Image: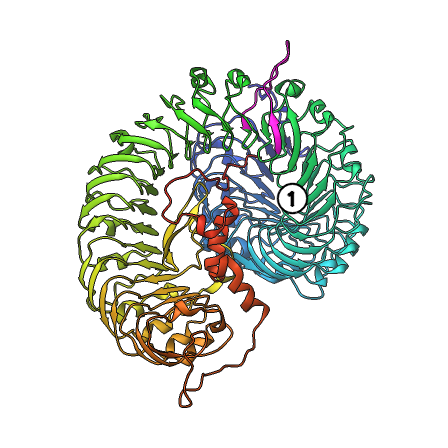
């Protein structure tokens, strides 16, 4: 700042004076490094003739905006933006009635209250520019804005926490050129439906709750240059008339619910530079927009596009970024894509592209993602000449051949390499004077590697390493302890044949996956920052060390299917997942679950635990899965678990639970319970009708019926054992629509409560091996989603209700060993059941039994109207029904083996699982 005492202040930098009077009329001290506060008695406020004041981008140390600014009665321009003011904007600001431009944008906790806003709108009638970005306007009523000056040209209220309905009339202001309202998530609104004439050039409501269809009215904005509507609630087709907004340079509509075809009229927008239509529901082919020669960024990812990438696109000579990932594009990758001179980023992953990769004549590419396609052949040698390449992801294709480390020597900027899940073999050949790039992220899963690659020795800053699903055996070499010693945060060595791991030395390691190896002995001491430890399906023995039990950082701990012994201590860390099933733990489950814990899954199945269910579990308000089956727990039914608001899976099977399940209290309702297994215990008395009445999670499938979702999280998937056709089967993923009640092998007696018929989303019902009497309720025919029904080995009598033929998804039926009589109903699904479904009922007759019905008992028939869906369901999962079949089908897909070879009491054989990894882009 060139201010010198004793000289004419009108010559100072940032100072402008009136030539006639010598009064200071403009002061620009922006970016001047000012620090401190502005007191009310400062001489600054003596400059009463000041018309323009700019104090932007200084540091006023979280001080208040002084009310003294109101003394500048002639002020037309005030800019206090990003100068570290805080607290409330003073009411006195609204007295600056001559203001034309006001900018109070901030990154601090500056607030604008509704009374101040009201006064500002009422008094400042000549306002043209209003910028309040990041100012907290959560108390401002949006309707207050409707009376803003008709002179307004620019309005910017981004990140203001403003909420409510934005006034539509503002969009019609005659001089308005810019509206920026982005990232006010609770701000809703719609655009004018007709007669929208405006000089608007920039419109941005991204990240708000603006909604509706994009109508032709927006296409009358002939001067519009930027239209940004991403992350809103817009839907419907894009109007073809959008092609008439010929001045448009930026079109950003991503993350909405737009559908239909992308209009070909977009090819008329020759000024377009940035096009983002990603994350919508567009379908059809990519339109011919290759004549848009100015486009630098093109994103149509995360849609439902089909067909091939256009074969001609050489006109896109300025294209720098291309995102087409996560569609259903097919065909080969056209050669013009590899020759674009400025292309730096290309993502075609998660499609169905086929063929070979062409050579890369252009060297500008920095990031290339082709993951999860059907590409094959060898990786072209020109790939290894792309000296500017930073990220290279070719995973989950069918590339073949041998890749040697020395091939990457010229990729000196490479930081991320993904070659997993191809038909590649990663070699070990090295050359003199060649080095492997200093990679941060390296994924070589399923690359036919038989030993730890020696080039890893040089990767001192490695952060992410995936060597899973290879053939690495023996001990981990000592030199590996130095690889990324201070930087490694993710390590996946799962599904190999590693026998020994002496230590976990990486001090910043957060994710460690060791499952499905041959690791023996005690578990090594984990690194202090470890958050996820997955070491299931190994041969670890001994007691789990105290530092693991009491860890303050571990979130997911899966030590299942090992040989761990000892007791569970009173100290249990704040886990979200604790999976210790299939070990040899003994003693009681301690009262160690504190309030406000994060536990989501607790699985202690198949140990030697005894005693009571700990009452402190009531503190686990986030608990979704509780499985303590196959232990020696001796208790009555823990009704108080019904207070857990998120509990979805409750497994108590094969323990020593006893006594009657008393009348259920309404306030303990198990509101989200979808799977309950009480089988193989000693429960007595009648089935608890009030209990079933409160199972709201089984009454309606709702939205999840149309979505394939699983219980679990990114790095851990919950599983559950179910009894189907008399066999225990582990579903290694739990569909959120999978609902089951298994009360079998107890001592329940009395009638089957009719209220069960209200559980319309129920998929599996097993009440077998009890002492249930009277008739099968005909209302069970209302369980329209039921796929498996087992009432065998009871004392049920009477006829099989005709209404059961309404269960068109039913693929497993067992009514054997009861006292049923009369004709077996005939219908589409019933014709698929064999003799064993009815054996042990001497009074039954008709197909499929050899016993014919008499004249007084003709077989009951239903119309033989079947559909494709009925019969496909019967086949799915080897006759296990739709949802059960999808759950079992996951296992068949993963293991490549039929259902009955999967987990039918077989103990821990190494199986491939779908790999979960961090995606770094």
x, y (%) of residue 282? 67, 55
Q: In x, y percent, where is residue 183?
A: 54, 48
Position of the N terminus by quadrant: top right
Query: 40 or 920: nearer the eye?
Result: 920
Looking at the image, residue 126 sits to the left or right of residue 386; the answer is: left
**Which quadrant holds residue 39?**
top left
Q: Position of residue 352 (x, y in %)?
A: 67, 46
Write down the region rendered in magenta: 423-442
Q: Which secondary structure class fits the magenta region best?
A: loop
Q: Nearer the viewer, residue 625 or 538?
A: 538
Res. 657 in view: yes
**Mark 1, residue position:** 325
Q: Residue at horizontal 82%, vertical 45%?
A: 291
Residue 849's quadrant in the figure?
Answer: bottom left
Q: Residue furthest bottom?
A: 856
**Residue 24, visible in the rendered structure:** no
Nearest the camera: 773 or 532? 773
Res. 37 image quadrant: top left
Vertical placement of residue 236 versus 550, above or below:
below
Dot 1 lies on which element?
A: loop
Q: In the image, is residue 478 above or below residue 875?
A: above
Task: Decide whether residue 435 is among the magenta residues.
Answer: yes
Count the numbered circles shown. Answer: 1
Residue at 68 percent across and 39 percent down: it is: 375
Q: Of residues 267 and 401, which is closer to you in this image? A: 401
- Looking at this view, name the residue that lies furthest to the front: 850
Position of residue 98 relative to residue 843, above or below, is above
In percent of the image, x 77 and y 59: which residue is there? Answer: 241
The reply to whether the magenta stretch includes residue 447 is no
How dense is the environment of label 1, judged by Cα within 10 Å: few (below 14), some, or many (20 and up)? many
The quarter of the rendered structure image containing the C terminus is top right
């Amino acid at each position: 700042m060139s201010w010198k005492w004793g000289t004419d202040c009108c010559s100072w930098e940032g100072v402008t004076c009136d030539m006639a009077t010598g009064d200071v009329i403009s002061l620009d001290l922006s970016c001047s490094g000012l620090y401190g506060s502005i007191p009310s008695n400062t001489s600054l406020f003596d400059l009463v003739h000041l018309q323009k004041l700019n104090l932007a981008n200084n540091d006023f140390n979280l001080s208040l905006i002084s009310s003294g600014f109101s003394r500048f009665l002639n002020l037309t321009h005030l800019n206090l933006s990003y100068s570290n003011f805080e607290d409330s904007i003073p009411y006195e600001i609204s007295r600056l009635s001559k203001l034309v431009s006001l900018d109070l944008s901030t990154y601090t906790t500056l607030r604008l209250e509704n009374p101040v806003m009201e006064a500002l709108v009422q008094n400042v009638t000549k306002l043209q520019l209003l910028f309040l970005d990041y100012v907290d306007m959560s108390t401002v009523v949006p309707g207050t804005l409707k009376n803003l000056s008709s002179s307004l040209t620019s309005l910017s209220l981004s990140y203001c926490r403003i909420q409510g309905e934005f006034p539509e009339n503002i969009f019609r202001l005659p001089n308005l050129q810019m509206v920026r309202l982005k990232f006010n998530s609770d701000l809703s609104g719609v655009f004018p439906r007709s007669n929208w004439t405006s000089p608007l050039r920039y419109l941005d409501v991204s990240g708000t709750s603006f909604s509706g269809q994009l109508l032709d009215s927006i296409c009358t904005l002939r001067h519009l240059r930027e239209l940004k509507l991403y992350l809103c609630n817009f839907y419907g087709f894009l109007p073809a008339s959008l092609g008439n907004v010929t001045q448009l340079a930026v079109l950003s509509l991503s993350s909405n619910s737009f559908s239909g075809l992308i209009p070909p009229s977009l090819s008329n927008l020759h000024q377009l530079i940035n096009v983002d239509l990603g994350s919508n529901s567009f379908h059809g082919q990519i339109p011919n927009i290759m004549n848009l020669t100015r486009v630098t960024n093109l994103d149509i990812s995360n849609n439902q596009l089909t067909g091939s990438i256009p074969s001609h696109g050489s006109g896109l000579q300025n294209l720098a970024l291309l995102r087409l990932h996560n569609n259903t594009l097919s065909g080969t990758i056209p050669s013009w894509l590899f020759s674009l001179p400025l292309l730096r980023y290309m993502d075609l992953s998660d499609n169905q592209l086929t063929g070979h990769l062409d050579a890369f004549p252009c060297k500008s590419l920095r990031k290339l993602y082709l993951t999860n396609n059907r590409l094959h052949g060898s990786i072209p040698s020109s790939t290894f000449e792309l000296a500017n390449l930073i990220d290279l992801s070719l995973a989950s294709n069918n590339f073949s051949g041998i890749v040697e480390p020395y091939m990457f020597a010229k990729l000196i900027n490479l930081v991320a390499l993904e070659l997993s899940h191809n038909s590649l073999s990663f070699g070990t050949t090295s050359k003199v004077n060649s080095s492997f790039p200093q990679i941060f992220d390296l994924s070589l899963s399923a690359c036919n590697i038989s030993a730890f690659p020696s080039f890893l020795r040089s990767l001192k800053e490695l952060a992410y390493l995936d060597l899973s699903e290879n053939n690495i055996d023996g001990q981990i070499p000592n030199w590996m302890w130095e690889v990324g010693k201070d930087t490694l945060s993710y390590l996946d060595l799962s599904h190999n044949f590693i026998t020994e791991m002496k230590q976990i030395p990486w001090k910043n390691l957060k994710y460690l996956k060791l499952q499905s190896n041959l690791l023996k002995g005690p578990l090594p001491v984990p690194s202090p920052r470890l958050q996820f430890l997955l070491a299931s399906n190994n041969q670890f023995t001994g007691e789990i060390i105290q530092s693991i039990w009491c860890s303050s950082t571990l979130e997911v701990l899966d030590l299942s299917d090992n040989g761990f012994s000892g007791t569970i201590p009173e100290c249990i860390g704040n886990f979200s997942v604790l999976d210790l099933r299939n070990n040899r733990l003994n003693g009681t489950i301690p009262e160690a679950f504190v309030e406000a814990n994060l536990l989501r899954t607790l699985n202690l199945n198949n140990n030697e635990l005894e005693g009571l269910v700990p009452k402190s579990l009531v503190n686990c308000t986030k608990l979704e899965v509780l499985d303590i089956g196959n232990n020696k727990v001796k208790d009555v039914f823990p009704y108080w678990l019904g207070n857990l608001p998120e509990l979805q899976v409750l497994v108590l099977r094969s323990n020593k639970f006893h006594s009657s399940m008393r009348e259920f209290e309404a306030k303990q309702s198990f509101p989200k319970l979808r799977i309950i297994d009480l089988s193989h215990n000693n429960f007595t008395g009648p089935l608890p009708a009030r209990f079933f009445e409160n199972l709201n999670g089984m009454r309606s499938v709702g939205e999840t019926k149309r979505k394939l979702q699983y219980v679990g999280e990114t790095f851990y998937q919950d599983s559950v054992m179910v009894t189907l056709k008399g066999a225990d089967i582990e579903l290694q993923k739990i569909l959120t629509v999978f609902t089951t009640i298994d009360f079998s092998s107890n001592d329940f007696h009395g009638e089957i409560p009719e209220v069960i018929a209200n559980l319309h989303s129920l998929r599996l019902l097993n009440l077998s091996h009890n002492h249930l009497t009277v008739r099968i309720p005909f209302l069970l025919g209302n369980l329209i989603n039921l796929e498996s029904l087992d009432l065998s080995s009871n004392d049920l009598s009477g006829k099989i209700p005709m209404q059961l033929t309404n269960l068109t998804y039913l693929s497993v039926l067992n009514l054997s060993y009861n006292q049923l009589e009369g004709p077996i109903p005939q219908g589409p699904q019933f014709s698929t059941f064999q003799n064993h479904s009815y054996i042990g009922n001497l009074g039954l007759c008709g197909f499929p039994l050899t016993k014919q019905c008499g004249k007084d008992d003709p077989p009951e028939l239903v119309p033989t109207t079947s559909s494709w869906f009925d019969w496909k369901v019967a086949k799915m999962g080897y006759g296990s029904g739709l949802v059960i079949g999808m759950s079992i089908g996951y296992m068949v897909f993963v293991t490549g083996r039929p259902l009955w070879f999967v987990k039918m009491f077989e103990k821990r054989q190494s199986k491939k699982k779908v790999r979960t990894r961090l995606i770094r882009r």
